[in-house]
Amino acid sequence: MEPLRILMVATSHEELGATGRKTGQWLEGFAAPYYVFMEAGAIVTLASVEGGMPPIDPASLGRETGPATRRFRTDPAAQTMLSHTMEISHARADDFHGVFYPGGHGPMWDLAHDRLSSDLLSAFAEQGKCIGAVCHAPAALLQVRFQGKSFIEGRTVTAFSNEEEEALGLVEEMPFVLEDVLKDAGAVYRKGRAFGPFVAVDRKLVSGQNPASSEPAALAFIDDVRKGVAFE
């Protein structure tokens, strides 16, 4: 069997609202899935809204980081890959078995509204391929259409919760409150313990609640991708 081909799509947004602080993708939200996919023997391609190096939230570089983050910081090959993402405009669903969106606050500003991203995700959905998103990255699903309606309508989805956003004191800084907007869009929102791992899987959609959910979401995603490829 040919190797699995996985596309990972990152944010290019780096300003945390009006706080004057930087944001972007949460490094664990990228690194943990990246190593899950690589260790599964997948060929991983990285893309972002603008291409090049996606911004990394400085807060995700602190001392209290997980093993995947520490591994990435001593992995020149992975660092080089991340610094040379292709523009999302060049990505085609036909070329991949699945697509995964890492977390971080950045997607709330760009991927939530990016037409190229929503069209790409719609193409993956139409082809029956697995879609994964973690933390704030499920915001990218809001504009996705599938069979004439919202892709997330009636689907079980998890994402960064109101409780978690409130704990960080960032509710007022967000362009919208993700949990509420997902519910308003017709998603069946589910969550686990705040800042603990929680994954939802529903009809080729795998979502993780927060950074701690990145690895288990990636494992569920790659398992779903394998099942889909086995039936091709």
Image: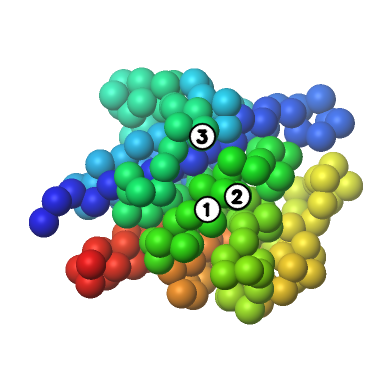
Residue indicated by mark 2? 118
Residue indicated by mark 3? 88
Q: Dot 3, crowdedness within 10 Å: few (<14), some or many (≥20)?
A: many
Q: Dot 1, crowdedness within 10 Å: few (<14), some or many (≥20)?
A: many
Residue indicated by mark 1? 121
> Does the residue at mark 2 contact the one at mark 1 (Cβ under 8 Å)?
yes
Residue 148 in view here: yes
Residue name at image x 49 percent, y 41 percent: 9
Residue name at image x 45 percent, y 56 percent: 124
Three-letter amino acid code of the residue under disc 3: Ile
> How far from the left and from the top, in percent, is residue 79?
38, 24
How many angstroms separate mark 2 from mark 1 (CA)? 5 Å
Residue name at image x 86 percent, y 31 percent: 18
> How far from the left and from the top, in percent, is residue 60?
57, 36
Question: On the rendered image, what quadrant is the N terminus found in?
Answer: bottom left
Check residue 222 in the rendering and tell me which mark sits there, or answer none: none
How many angstroms separate mark 3 from mark 2 (CA)? 11 Å
How many angstroms separate mark 1 from mark 3 (CA)? 11 Å
Whichever of labels 3 and 2 marks the residue nearer the N terminus, that label is: 3
> How far from the left and from the top, in percent, is residue 216?
41, 61
Q: Nearer the viewer, residue 143 or 110?
A: 143
